Amino acid sequence: MECGDVPFWLDVTLCCGQVFRWDKIGDWWYGVTRDKAFKVRQFGGKFEYVGVKPAFAEHYFNLDVDLQKIIDSVNRDSHIRKAAREYWGLRLINQDPWECLISYICATYKSIPAIKHMLNNMARKFGEKIHLDEREFFTFPSCEKLAAATERDLRDCGLGYRTRYVLETAQRVRDTQINLEDLKKLSYGEAKRALMEFPGVGAKVADCVLLFSLDKTESFPVDVWVKRVILNHYSDKLQAEFAKRLSTKKGLSSGDYERLNTWGRNYFGKYAGYAQEYLYHFERMSI
DNA sequence: CGTGGGCCTGTCTA
DNA sequence: ATAGACAGGCCCA
């Protein structure tokens, strides 16, 4: 799919599980990021949007990065080539770090529909109401708003055991006055360690936040699907013993996570996160 | 340091 | 229909 002379496939970009608060109504995708509601569509080969300025939309969808160059740089084998050809135009989105952090804290041990439900509940209860096309939308609540919420009100959003993680993370962000955007200035390793200080943030959640909101394209989140990708297509790259143990165990120990994560970053390089998204989506769609 | 069990609750399947 | 399994992990023993 092309957008002008830039490869971009909007539907896949918004469907591939990186971002949760977009919904398609007719041709248009409606979404909220930071304090803005906007709608976007790809129509007749053109990318159109209402509610934000061109620079905002182009930055949000990373349209200014050279996708061809990125895919060339992760082009290591026939499987990644196949995934890249199939979903050519899938782009990583520049999310707001705060919303991204809370989203992935909530995402543990949940399916995507359930995650969307939780986040929308939180926005409805604690966010600001805004309008577009006579429709109501809600901004994602600020850290002050969530930090001041009662445990009961948050729990009622369906957060379950994540309630105290969200509450304590919000309180810590508020109390330390940390600007999450500043983590962009740190190295991948430093920023990851900083994120993992927050309750409810382990290696996987940190890697998602780094990749989707802090410009760390070398991040390589490993979830059950990526583990599946590696076992199904890259097991020959791992030590036989290790691959065997992985395939017989259900979850991922922190040591196993570290090992797969490091493998991915070394194997695919600076843009390992793009490779991860293509592989992840390809695997999910081939069930 | 590595490993296993528990955890809230919405969805999906049988 | 309604119970039961499972979900894009994290934390603590």
Image (cartoon, coloured by chain):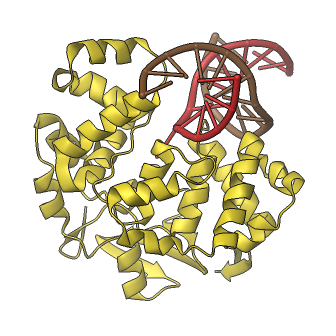
Chain colours: A yellow, B brown, C red
Q: Is residue A235 above or below residue A97?
A: above
Q: Indicate the quadrant where residue A62 lies.
A: bottom left
Residue A276, image x and y in percent?
Answer: 30, 45
Q: Is residue A285 above or below residue A135?
A: above
Residue A138, image x and y in percent?
Answer: 70, 72
* Left or right placement of residue A104 versus residue A266 in this view: right
Q: Indicate the quadrant where residue A271 lies.
A: bottom left
Residue A245 visible within the image: yes
Q: Nearer the viewer, residue A94 or A240?
A: A240
Q: Is residue A223 above or below residue A141?
A: above
Q: Is residue B11 above or below residue A35?
A: above
Residue A203, image x and y in percent?
Answer: 46, 44
Which residue is at 40% across, 29% downward? A255
* Left or right placement of residue A226 versus residue A160 in this view: left
Q: Nearer the viewer, residue B7 or A39?
A: B7
Which residue is at 56% across, 51% downward? A104
Question: Which quadrant would the N terminus of chain A be assigned to in this image?
Answer: bottom left
Residue A258, image x and y in percent?
Answer: 36, 36
Which residue is at 47% across, 67% downward? A95
Question: Which quadrant would the C terminus of chain A be assigned to in this image?
Answer: top left
Q: Indicate the quadrant where residue A110 lies.
A: top right
Residue A286 visible within the image: no
Q: Nearer the viewer, residue A55 or A49?
A: A55
Q: Residue furthest bottom?
A: A53
